[in-house]
């Protein structure tokens, strides 16, 4: 259960990262998106770390969040998807799966 929470909290990371990247007059939208994303992300991380070792849980959270943020950035046209980058993200996610497998 807590591994599922940890993965979901990692997927919340792109929300607050996106809020930081938004520009314009939509201050309330940006602030709301940041608060929801950070709350879900940090709250889930804190809950999951009650039973998962910090070193493993934090690495999984960062890996999932980084991969999801990269995917969102590519989908929004803010970043380029190359074969090398895709391979590196797959390796990152493979490391996350490996950490789960040995924990």
Image (cartoon, helix red, strand yellow):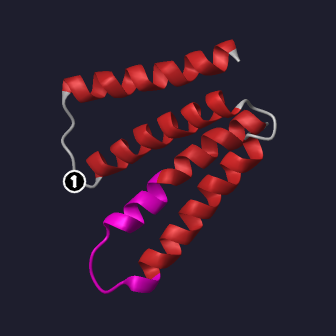
Taking the spot 21% from the left edge, 47% from the top edge, the residue there is: 79
Q: Position of residue 74 (x, y in %)?
A: 27, 46
Please tell me whether mark 1 sits on a helix, a strand or a loop: loop
Image quadrant holding the N terminus, namely: top right
Q: Position of residue 48 (x, y in %)?
A: 74, 41
Eyeballing the image, is 40 above or below 90? below
Taking the spot 30% from the left edge, 50% from the top edge, the residue there is: 73
27 left or right, relative to 81: right
Residue under label 1, please give it. Answer: 78
Eyeballing the image, is 96 above or below 7? above
Q: Is residue 4 magenta?
A: no
Taking the spot 76% from the left edge, 38% from the top edge, the residue there is: 2
Taking the spot 70% from the left edge, 37% from the top edge, the residue there is: 4
What span is colored magenta in the figure?
14-28
Q: Quadrant of residue 86?
A: top left
* Predominant secondary structure, magenta span: helix
Give the camera-side residue of 73 and 92.
Answer: 92
């Amino acid at each position: 259960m807590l591994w599922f929470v940890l993965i979901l909290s990692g997927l919340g990371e792109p929300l607050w990262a996106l809020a930081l990247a938004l520009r314009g007059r939509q201050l309330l939208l940006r602030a709301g998106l940041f608060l929801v994303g950070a709350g879900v992300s940090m709250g889930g991380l804190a809950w999951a770390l009650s039973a998962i070792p910090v070193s493993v849980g934090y690495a999984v959270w960062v890996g999932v969040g980084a991969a999801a943020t990269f995917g969102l950035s590519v989908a929004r046209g803010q970043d380029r998807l190359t074969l090398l980058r895709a391979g590196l993200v797959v390796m990152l996610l493979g490391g996350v799966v490996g950490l789960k497998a040995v924990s």
